[in-house]
Image (cartoon, helix red, strand yellow):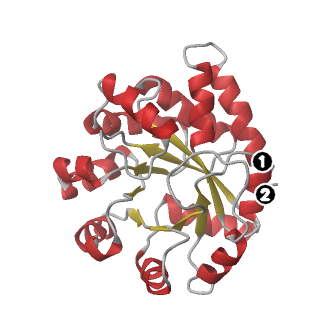
Amino acid sequence: MNRIDSLFARKRAEGAKSLIIFLSAGYPDLPTSVELAAACAEAGADLIEFGVPFSDPIADGPTIQRSSAIALQRGVTLNKILAAVPEIRKRTAAPVILFGALNPFLHHGLEKVVREARAAGADGFIIPDLPPEESGEFESICRAEEMAMTHLLAPTSPPERRRLVAKRSMGFLYYMSVKGVTGARKDLPPDLADNLRQIRALTDKPLAVGFGISTPEHVRQGAAVADAVVVGSAAINLIGQYEGKPELLGKVRDYVASLAGALK
C-alpha cells in the first residue's frame, strides 16, 4: 500500500475528507516550488500534485499555461523535477503525484520515469492525454513499482467510460467538475452532486473533484459528495500575485489553511 492508498484509507476510517493542492513545478522557480509544496502540506494539504510543465498544454487553462511557460523559460525539465522531489519528501510525508502530459514521460522512458519517480519519493501519476484504452503498459509498470496511475472523468464521460475509469484508475478517480480547461470559477456546476453520486454507484474507490474550485465554500460543496477536493489555478494565481515578495509562503500557507479548515 503506497502513501496515496494509506491516506485515503486513514481518512475514510476517520470519516474525513482530503485536500489536494496542484502546484506548477518550477514556478516561480524550482527551489521555491519545493518550499511551496512543503508550506501547503504544513497548512493542511493532504496530497500535492506537482505539475510537469510542457510546451503544449493538456487541459490547462490560462493560469497554469502561464506558470508552465515561465517554468520552461527558466530551464525546468523533468530530470530537474525528479531531482527536486526528494527535497519535498524530506519536508513532508504527504503523497506527491506528478501531473503532466505524456510526452515528457514517454521521452524519458516509461519504465525509467516510474522507477526514478518512485526512488525520488513520488507516489503516482496523472496524465490527462493518456486514456485508459491506451495506458495498459504504463499501468503495468506503475503497478509493479507500487505507484498509482490515476485517470480522469469529465461531465461528458458516457456510462461506459465511467465504468472503464472506475475499474482502471489507481489511487483514486479524478472527476473534472466542469467542461473545458482548468481555472477558478465563481460557482460550481449544479449537476456536480448528481454526477458524483452516479460515479460513486460504480466504485468504492476514492473520488476527487477538481477544476474550478477556489474558495472554502467550493471545498465544502465538493467534500459533501467526494472524498477529496483539488485546488490548482487559484493557488497559482496567488503565487503569481506574490512572486518575489517575502510574504509569498505565508500568503499561500494562509490560503491553504483556509481551504483545509473548510473540511473540518
Could you say which quadrant of the image residue 255 lies in? top right
Q: Is residue 261 visible?
A: yes
* Residue depicted at x 49% and y 75%: 157
Taking 44 as reference, is 30 left or right? left
Location of residue 173 in the rendering, given as x and y in whole percent from the top left corner: 52, 69
* Residue depicted at x 59% and y 80%: 199
Residue type, mark 2 in image: Arg
Residue type, mark 1 in image: Pro
Residue count near mark 2 (Cα–Cα under 10 Å), binned few <14, some 14–19, many ≥20: some
Taking 203 as reference, is 81 left or right? left
Q: Which mark is residue 216?
A: 1
Location of residue 134 in the rendering, given as x and y in whole percent from the top left corner: 26, 72
Residue sitting nearer the eye, 225 or 97: 225
* Callout 2: SS: helix
Residue sitting nearer the eye, 5 or 245: 245
Residue count near mark 1 (Cα–Cα under 10 Å), binned few <14, some 14–19, many ≥20: some
Is there CB contact under 8 Å for labels 1 and 2? yes
Location of residue 196 in the rendering, given as x and y in whole percent from the top left corner: 64, 74
Q: Looking at the picture, does residue 187 appear above or below residue 80?
A: below
Q: Which residue is mark 2?
A: 220
Q: Is residue 38 visible?
A: no
* Residue depicted at x 47% and y 85%: 163
Could you say which quadrant of the image residue 111 lies in? bottom left
Location of residue 189 in the rendering, given as x and y in whole percent from the top left corner: 69, 63
Image quadrant occupied by the C terminus: bottom right
Taking 66 as reference, is 191 left or right? right
* Callout 1: SS: helix
State the CA–CA distance, disc 1 to disc 2: 6 Å
